[in-house]
Image (cartoon, rainbow, N blue to C red):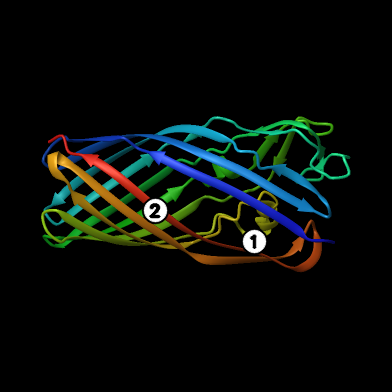
């Protein structure tokens, strides 16, 4: 049957300027404007044919997050937040040559041929809801527990690519991501008046079920990680500024399927792990 060679790259950057208000001694509310940029590219060949959407393409998105906290006592606080769908502008790839060396045209990911020209798609991020509680066993030590729901199916049930395909203007790729529940456990300790250190553990379900593995590998989106650890620290700087650094590592996860294009093959396997680094600058108005 030949060898499949595939490549994908998704770069994501986000800024979230936020404001928070203390409504009463027990109730606080916060609002953030989520502004993001993403760069997405794909490339896949199979049996000498394939599609090439690797020309640099940036898209820009916007959304919002609202949240609140209720201070039940000095040692127990409850909280909840909602993050809207982050809608992005279209991604564009301009191809100035035939994808296939024979010059016949490119074979798309579902067997539809396409040629030179402009291709476009969009990739949104889902709405999320979270709720949890924070406990202070002692004054300087915080432990938090959170449940989070991600509505993947609303944005990742299918991926539509528009362009000069033969016989159609749109190719729809059935990714069929499922909604996901995630459990988060975190802890923070105040070393002194300037430094805070924190760590966390995350476990969630896999949004890609085994029957949908080959469809996601065709578009090279094997987002199958389920377990992650995080570490971070915050330093209070002069003039009410603060600096926060964070690191996340997701552990490698494997999913195996024994079919490809409805044909029996050697087990089709997807593996994934991730590392992420973040830096945040904050300012305290009061």
Distance of label 1 from label 2 (alpha carbons): 30 Å
Q: Is residue 202 left or right of residue 198?
A: right
* Residue carrying label 1: 210
Q: Is residue 152 left or right of residue 32?
A: right
Instruction: Specify whether 180 is left or right of 271.
Output: left
Disc 1 and disc 2 in contact, CB within 8 angstroms: no
* x, y percent for residue 38: 51, 39
Name the residue rendered at 54%, 30% in the picture: 89
Query: Is 209 rendered above or below residue 23?
Result: below
Q: Quadrant of residue 13?
A: top left
The quarter in which the N terminus is drawn is bottom right
- Label 1: which secondary element: helix
Image quadrant assignment for residue 82: top left
The quarter in which the C terminus is drawn is top left
Residue at the spot x=64%, y=61% of the render?
Answer: 210
Residue 271 vs residue 65, the one in the foreground: 271
Circle 2 residue: 277
Indicate the position of residue 212 as horizontal and vertical percent values.
66, 55
Q: Which of disc 2 and disc 1 is earlier in sequence?
A: 1
Q: Residue 36, percent across and down?
A: 44, 36
Camera-side residue of 201 and 57: 57
């Amino acid at each position: 049957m030949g060898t499949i060679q595939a490549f994908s790259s998704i770069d994501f950057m986000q800024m979230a300027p936020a404001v928070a208000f203390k409504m009463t001694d027990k109730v606080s509310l916060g609002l953030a404007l989520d502004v993001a940029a993403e760069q997405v590219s794909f490339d896949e060949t199979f049996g000498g044919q394939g599609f090439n959407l690797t020309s640099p393409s940036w898209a820009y998105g916007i959304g919002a997050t609202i949240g609140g906290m209720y201070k039940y006592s000095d040692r127990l606080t409850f909280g909840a937040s909602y993050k809207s769908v982050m809608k992005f502008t279209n991604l564009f790839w301009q191809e100035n040559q035939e994808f296939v060396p024979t010059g016949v045209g490119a074979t798309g990911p579902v067997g539809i041929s396409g040629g030179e020209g402009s291709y476009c798609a969009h990739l949104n991020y889902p709405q999320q809801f979270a709720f949890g509680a924070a406990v202070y066993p002692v004054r300087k030590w915080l432990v938090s527990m959170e449940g989070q729901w991600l509505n993947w199916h609303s944005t990742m049930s299918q991926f539509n690519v528009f362009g000069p395909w033969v016989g159609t203007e749109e190719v729809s790729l059935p990714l069929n991501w499922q909604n996901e529940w995630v459990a988060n456990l975190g802890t923070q300790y105040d070393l002194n008046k300037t430094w805070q250190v924190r760590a966390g553990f995350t476990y969630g379900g896999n949004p890609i079920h085994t029957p949908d593995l080959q469809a996601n590998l065709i578009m090279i989106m094997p987002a199958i990680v389920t377990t992650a650890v995080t570490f971070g620290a915050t330093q209070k700087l002069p003039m009410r500024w603060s600096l926060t650094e964070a690191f996340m590592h997701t552990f490698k996860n494997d999913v195996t399927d024994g079919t490809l294009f409805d044909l029996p093959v050697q087990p089709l396997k997807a593996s994934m792990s991730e590392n992420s680094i973040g830096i945040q600058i904050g300012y305290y108005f009061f």
